[in-house]
Image (tube, rainbow, N blue to C red):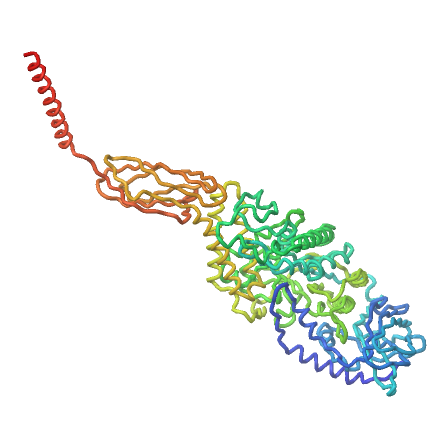
Amino acid sequence: MLRSSSLPRALAVVTAVLAGSLGATVVAPGLAGPRLGAAESAAADAPRDPAQPLVPRIRSITPDYIPDHGPIVVRGTLTNASNEEWTAINVEAFIGATPITTSAELAAAATTPVTADVGHRITAPGTFDTFETLQPGQTVRFTVRLPRSQLPVSAPGVYWFGVHALGATAAGSGTGAAGRDRTFLPLVPESASNGAIPVDAALVVPVRAAVTRGTDGSILDALGWMANLDSGALDHAADLGRAAHGRPLTWLLDPAVTDAVRALARGNPARSLTSARDSTSGNPSAGASPSADASASGTGSTSAGTAPSATAQSAARWLRRLHRVLANGTGEILGLPYGDLEVSAAARYDRPYLDADLRRTGTTLAPWKLPIAGPVVAPPGGRLTAAVVGALPRHTRVLLSDRGVVGPAPVVNRVDGRRVVLASTGAAEGGPGPLDPHSPLARRQRILSEAALHFLGNGAPLVVELPTRWRSRVPGSFFSGLDVPWLHLTTLDGAATSPPKPLQGARLRQPVTSSPGLGPEFFAGVELVLGDAGTLQSILPGNRVLQQQIFDETTGNTSYAAAADPFGATARVRSTTAWVRAGLDGITLAAPPSVTLTSTSGKFSVLVSNDLDVPVTVRVRPVADSHLKISGGETVQLPPHGRQSVLLDATTHVLGVHTVTLEVTNKAGTPLGSQDAFPMRAEQVSQLIWVIIGAGLALLFGAIVVRLVRRVRRSRA
């Protein structure tokens, strides 16, 4: 038996909302900290009913679609959220009369006001649950069993479905529902699914977070990371992989995240000039910093009592969980640009850095040696311009939102020779409310409904980027409920096998941002510190990782999260630059005040000093005019805090004063920064002077001989 309702009025409301949504411009949310997708933001705007004295919450629907035969069993909880006692309570199911047949209609339906009547209640005996009384704050469990014969629907599509709670108080009973919960229920007849090719659906799980390091290179906010690993977005990603039980998932993974968590598991060591073996030992004090402030970790995990061990344990535990779900071999790992690079700014101002960042992502996830199927660019807002897409290497995958394109477009496209896949924003938004549109059940029903509409329509694949945060743990039933005849779970590459359709670049929407972003001066500073880091590494025997460590730090300052605070990112890059420069400036030389050559050649010495805590290998390079040749000082090996005199040879055939500049370089001749200049005077004594000196000496010795002879003669006389 069906109760009448204002269904025509509700359909008019849906139509009006649909018209408004098609003409609206979707604004992507800003990013602060870990990524928040557009779907998650849109779902947060789903309608709520602030005046529900009775709060029903659907916990499970078995099966989670309308079958051709057999009953539907709905289980959930009912809570008295009022201050009054409720009696004679019925929990009755309802179902819509007209199917939703397009994704646009489904998106509009998800924003339907809670007070809109979208279906008829089913009141046949035995189809509802009853409770005699419910005290304030009391919660009970309900079960509603609906025979297929009580569901008067047969047309394929997606139907409104849910439960209403009705009852009475001391003031009497009303005619409307005192509480309601709603979702979507697809109907795909067996006649339509038998023998038909199911829709390929790819569920994409992002693993990304803001990796920010302090002045000493240690990861900032270690306690915040611990919370993220234990109960935040990173914890939810690992939990989602566990709940899949081996079903294929596509992981959008930023390798900088796993590297950062691995550093936390080692105790969050500070940056060091020691060799690669020592720098990975997990000892933050190994190798003193060249700068005065580098030893003050302050905000790192090394400064908080028991926090380091707790953070390290959380990090190690999360790494084990993630490794298990990534190594099952059923999914696909796609590597985000290392550090979640803000691709648009890098493509505009520093193409070499963009290319280097994508290479840093690599093809293997170390140290687990898991294969990365390839790099993927997936901006948080789901939008990129055609110019940015064209700046990417041709083998790079691009994942955008379907709302990042003007007008309808297929799932697999080609823009300027690059493959661009569009993810369904609506499928990730969840249910229509009024309760929790972010619950696993609400999101699963939305994905099932979108897949059903694709199957009943053109059979296009469905790509869903799942949210980074869930309101509750994802149960295994989230995935088992997707095991339906019309849906085939696969990876992103498996779903995007169809030939791409050309898409005009002008149809790509401009990314929306409220911050000034990262400009050309910022990237110039990044290139400067990377060049200095390479020079510093070249003088450190045995250290082959310093430049990569500095590069990894800069990626944390060029990320989407950092772009929201460009002034903070600039300050951190300058801090790293100061640390590197302090290392280079720790090698100094002292030349003599002046040098005089009394012939065509001569020797002189300079003093080279190493103020660092590590040994270095450098050269002394002279710079003078073409008439003066100076050799020596090719290789100088200095121990920690050591000094050494270096002997140099000077040769010239041109008399006069020459200005000589000595500078310290690496073996390749790149200056470190320290230099000293002095005058060198070349003087050659003439032959006449030597004749005069010789004659004078001859006269002197002759006079001595004469006097001796005379003295001898006098003595004999």
Judge left or right: residue 704 versus residue 307: left
Residue that appears at 66% across and 77% down: 22
Judge left or right: residue 395 versus residue 92: left
Q: How many numbered marks, from 0 up?
A: 0
Look at the image and tell me in which quarter the N terminus lies: bottom right
Look at the image and tell me in which quarter the C terminus lies: top left
Q: Is residue 97 visible?
A: no
Q: x, y percentage for residue 569?
A: 53, 62
Most foreground residue, 455 or 246: 246
Depicted 603 relative to depicted 443: above or below: above
Q: x, y percentage for residue 490?
A: 73, 57
Task: Give the image quarter of residue 74.
Answer: bottom right
Q: x, y percentage for residue 555?
A: 55, 57
Which residue appears farthest toward the bottom when viewing the image?
171
Most foreground residue, 323 or 102: 323
Task: Give the image quarter of residue 48.
Answer: bottom right
Which residue appears farthest toward the top when viewing the image?
716
Which residue appears farthest toward the right when viewing the image?
125
Judge left or right: residue 552 versus residue 74: left
Depicted 266 relative to depicted 203: above or below: above
Q: x, y percentage for residue 69?
A: 90, 68
Judge left or right: residue 581 versus residue 6: left
